[in-house]
Amino acid sequence: MKRNPLTFASLAILAVLLLCAAAAPQLAPLDPSAQELANRLQPPSSAHWFGTDELGRDVLSRVIFGARISVWIGISVVAISLLVGAAIGSLAGFYGGWLDRLLNLIVINTLMAFPGILLALAFVAFLGPGIGKLILALSLGGWIGYARLVRGEVLKTRERDYVQAARALGVRAGRLMIVHIWPGVVAPVMVQTAIGLAAVILSEATLSFLGLGVPPPTPTWGGMLNDGRAHVFDAPHLIVFPALSVMLVILSFNFLGDALRDRLDPRLRKEFL
Amino acid sequence: MKTLLIAAAEHFAARFLYTAPVVFLVVSLVFFLIHLVPGDPVEQMLGERAQAADIERMRQELGLDQPVLTQYVRYLSRLVRGDLGRSFRFNSPVTQIILTRYPATILLTLASLLVALLLSIPAGVQAAVHRGRWPDGALGFLSLLGLSFPNFALGPLLILVFSVEAGWLPVSGSGSLLHLILPAVTLGTALAAILTRMVRTSVLEELEQDYVRTARAKGLAEPRVRYKHVLRNGLIPVVTLVGLQLGALLSGAMVTETIFSWPGIGRLTLQAINSRDYPLVQGCFLTIAVTYVLVNLVTDLLYSVVDPRIREA
């Protein structure tokens, strides 16, 4: 594998992200909820490396704790989406027929009629705020990509000679799926997972920005950006640091997804970074 | 020719028949969303201090005292007449409110699309022509940056640079072309990044074709070869991608309209959610979802007109 410095940089950024998520209380210099109204809207300084917000809270500490929320929600949503999507996609691809038509044409295409985060927005709008409800809302649309991917791969793989041979030898459907078909699905699913994590973190940040994500006072990057908009004239640092955090994480996941794709499936290699 | 027309008509009819049940299911899903609300949606609308008599009156007005199936049938029959109910907050028909806001979202979406095309086509062509050299790498990095920079982060940064620091453009609002620039750039950047990659890939494939070698051998100037011959064929797959991405533009418009206080249906949806105006929320979700389905249908039909292999498939 050709060494790509961007891939290593991405891995480093993601390692920092995971570190923040795992050890936020140890890494954060201050309590993210601690208010110092006398020091509100301070620019970056030696006391507060990222400055303070409108309530005098340390922005660096809030960015670190925001990383924890993003990672926790990202991993939860991807895990649920992957489990549900892989199960549904496997059934649809393996058995085909009316089940495939029902799932693929009707269920998936109906849910995909709600573009972007609209489906998650609809559920959050009606179910109300909360981390658990947010995870559920994001998972409702998240499983579709995995289902379509797994369905496509299972459809391709089930016609292979070795699968047909195993079927002719009387191997049961479950064993056929787990031992013979799923190993071929792992590589594209890993690529999709990396990209999917970026998408979930982005969706969570977007919903928080719109005031429909994790409710305050829990710090989230999207929420910080939304709060910072009111101070774009007098405290632009409130926008810059959360914006850079989101951008670096999304960029890193995209690079990682590209690197995984190049490594695991050279047919899909793209020379364009 | 007649066979071609019949094949096209059959393809169009098949797509319409396929789309109709999806639209019906979308309409039904939007109806049942309101029944997901835990507890009484009317109590949620009117708040904790509402009187029991007011709650009961509102429930009757909205038809929520009827059995779910009756409500569903009534909802479908009103929908066929274009009646999306009455907004609790604005005390006006939802259809009327949406129709006053919808054109602003269409304008923003089209402006964003224009920005994306103006950025991506020359960038993609240059990246393809200079494949493997630094312009290709630089444009590739920029496109990945554009993909990774969310619009809710980009918008405030653009405001900071062009409105606050430079003072060239207004911070928010609508009413002039200047008000449209920052929202269109914010919304169009991610699409520009996606399209640049597609244009590059597509142009690279076309540059390998025999007709390009022929054109060069005939002595045609290189810009003419690239933009008159190569790009015409290279843009065919881009058409499909634009259609598919219009849905992402519609959902992204919600955030962009909020940042810039643009009076479109996206901002209206959020205002309706925050004020728990459920008839208006339903109407907005329905409008956006059905628009997306119809845009996909039109894209698919346009693509089959442009590329006959799709009709014959």
Image (cartoon, coloured by chain):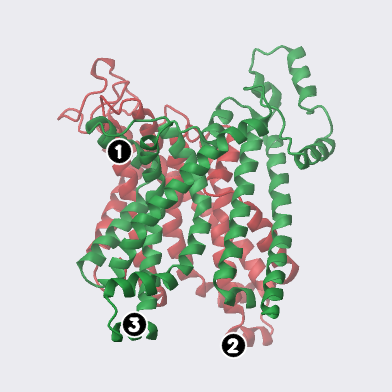
Q: CA distance from mark 1 to mark 3?
A: 45 Å
Residue A106 falls left or right of residue B190: right
Identity of the residue drawn at 48% across and 46% down: B109
Query: Residues at marks 1 and 3, common chain?
Result: yes
User: From where the camera sits, is residue B214 visible?
Assistant: yes
Residue A72 falls left or right of residue A132: left
Secondary structure beneath disc 3?
helix
Identity of the residue drawn at 82% across and 36% down: B74
Label 3: which residue? B215
Counting residues from the start of the chain, the first of labels 1 and 3 encountered is 1
Q: Position of residue B175 (x, y in %)?
A: 43, 31
What is the chain letter for disc 2? A
Q: Position of residue B24 (x, y in %)?
A: 73, 50
**Do the numbered discs 2 and 3 sit on residues whose CB atoms are within 8 Å?**
no
Instruction: Name above or below for residue A143 compared with residue A162.
Output: above
**Do the numbered discs 1 and 2 sit on residues whose CB atoms are within 8 Å?**
no
At label 2, counting other C-alpha atoms closer than 10 Å, the crowd grade (few under 14, some 14-19, many 20 or more) is few
Which amino acid does the dot numbered 1 rest on?
Leu
The nearer-to-camera label among 1 and 3 is: 3
Secondary structure beneath disc 2?
helix
Q: Position of residue A146 (x, y in %)?
A: 54, 61
Label 2: which residue? A161
Instruction: Name above or below for residue B271 compared with residue A191.
Output: above
At label 1, counting other C-alpha atoms closer than 10 Å, the crowd grade (few under 14, some 14-19, many 20 or more) is many
| Most foreground residue, A235 or B269 | B269
- What chain is colored red? A
- What chain is colored green? B
The image quarter containing residue B178 is top left
